[in-house]
Amino acid sequence: MRLSKFFLPTTKETPADAAIASHQLMLRAGMIRQESAGIYSWLPLGFRVLKKVEQIVREEQDRAGAIEMLMPTIQPADLWRESGRYDAYGDEMLRIQDRHKREMLYGPTNEEMITSIFRNFCRSYKELPKLLYHIQWKFRDERRPRFGVMRGREFLMKDAYSFDISEAEAMKSYNRMFVAYLNTFARMGLKAFPMKAETGPIGGDLSHEFIILAENGESEVFCHRDLLDLPPPGLDVDFDGDLQGIVDERTRLYAATEDVHDEAAFAAIPDDKKVSARGIEVGQVFYFGTQYSEPMKARVSHPTQGEVAVHMGSYGIGVSRIVGGLIEAFNDEAGIIWPRSVAPFDVGILNMRAGDEQTDAACEAIYNDLIAAGLEPLYDDTDARAGGKFSKMDLIGLPDQIIVGPRGLKDGIVEVKDRATGERVDLSPIAAVAEIVRRHGTKY
Ligand code: ATP
Ligand code: MG
């Protein structure tokens, strides 16, 4: 992409109403625009990151055996009357009336709808297990929308739902999602820790929130320090094998959110291993048994027990919240520092003398070579001043920069800068492209 043709409305001023770094930087970097409280347009730069995050989530859901589909944002109220949640959900639910005065709502989550889909088509235990997901916009009329996309009213969520014949089988589905989540966040460069959590309006018996530690996080969490050192399971994990060991390794260490925090259990941890911190909830998994399948009559024939209600779980990831969470985790005074796997572009090319024949030609060659190598460069081909180019590129946080100027080219070199470390190396244009390709080979 050529910057002259792109749409990147960056600003220098720090917006007054943005309280934390990620919100400020998303506005300054031209990633989002607020349309009303907690509702945002995703401008091209932000949209590219959102899509990268979504794609990693999708790939890891697929790897874990979940099957993608798409349910609508608008749901009929009657479905929610069946589960008893239409009244229980309260003011967070956006209620709508259509032209026939039928009551509708903008879905805050999809347990009811997926349960009704399941019961419509699946009647036999032979259909089980089933693990279905979609990535769809949700609406929750939050009391206090804040921190930009981190607590929006309209937000993008991946929500998966599992259907099993028994609690024991449902635990296997739970473990699949649990392990998939560890890999998902690791691929984005995030350390997300599973913590025992309250089930809230979703209901149920067992739940973990996945939390990234962050000073400005809204959640208060408590855990054993050793949990923070465990490496992710890795992409070669066998999802059809026994995942209990991987889950146990994480859940035997104390880790809990504020709502279910157990003072006595925490006190028993040696002092040098006690962690009490703030964090951002990026995902949550629930097992809730027959809470929806019972009232909604989602039953299957059981080989020996006749008709039984299916055991269900649901599994959310805050796709749009993660974009803000990533910036909270990766930024400095100059701006954002994207991990390579989610960066909006892989590399920036800075033409330090646009209009100079030799400099233009060198930039064009680098730009084309990077594209040919399968990378996505953003080429600053504008005639802006050097200082402005440097600060804009640092602000938007692409992982690598190639700085091309007439002085270097006279000696046959360009400069390659690593945004995260600030390290600079002088290389020939060809070696610079090879170096960028090499760095991106180690994406995850
Ligand atoms: P919170 O406690 O932060 O309000 P929640 O527990 O109500 O979230 P879930 O029902 O678990 O949310 O939804 C799944 C995921 O969706 C959450 O883990 C979070 O990452 C994301 N999410 C929830 N509410 C919002 C919101 N208002 N804005 C952006 N993302 C959200
Ligand atoms: Mg939650």
Image (spheres, grey):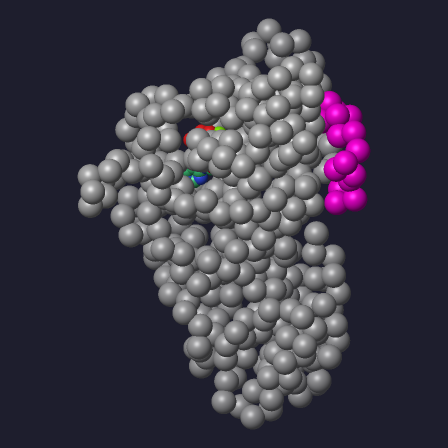
Write down the quadrant of residue 33 in the picture.
bottom left
Residue 65 is one of the magenta-drawn residues:
no
Residue range (magenta): 234-250
Count of numbered marks: 0
Residue 114 location (% of width, % of height): 49, 35
Considering depth in this image, is 200 or 148 the residue closer to the camera?
200
Q: Is residue 251 above or below residue 427?
A: above
Considering depth in this image, is 26 or 310 the residue closer to the camera?
310
Q: Is residue 219 above or below residue 359?
A: above
Q: In screen coordinates, is 443 left or right of 85? A: right
Q: Which residue does the image show at 62% across and 72% down from the upper left?
A: 402
Residue 314 location (% of width, % of height): 54, 31
Residue 246 is one of the magenta-drawn residues:
yes
Considering depth in this image, is 411 or 312 the residue closer to the camera?
312
Q: Is residue 442 visible?
A: yes
Residue 217 location (% of width, % of height): 48, 33
Write down the quadrant of residue 109 in the picture.
top left
Q: Is residue 295 above or below residue 382?
A: above
Q: Which residue does the image show at 59% across and 71% down from the upper left?
A: 377
Q: In screen coordinates, is 221 left or right of 432? A: left
Residue 399 location (% of width, % of height): 61, 60
Q: Which residue does the image show at 66% across and 38% down from the upper left?
A: 180
Considering depth in this image, is 153 or 429 the residue closer to the camera?
153
Q: Which residue does the image show at 28% across and 29% down from the upper left?
A: 91
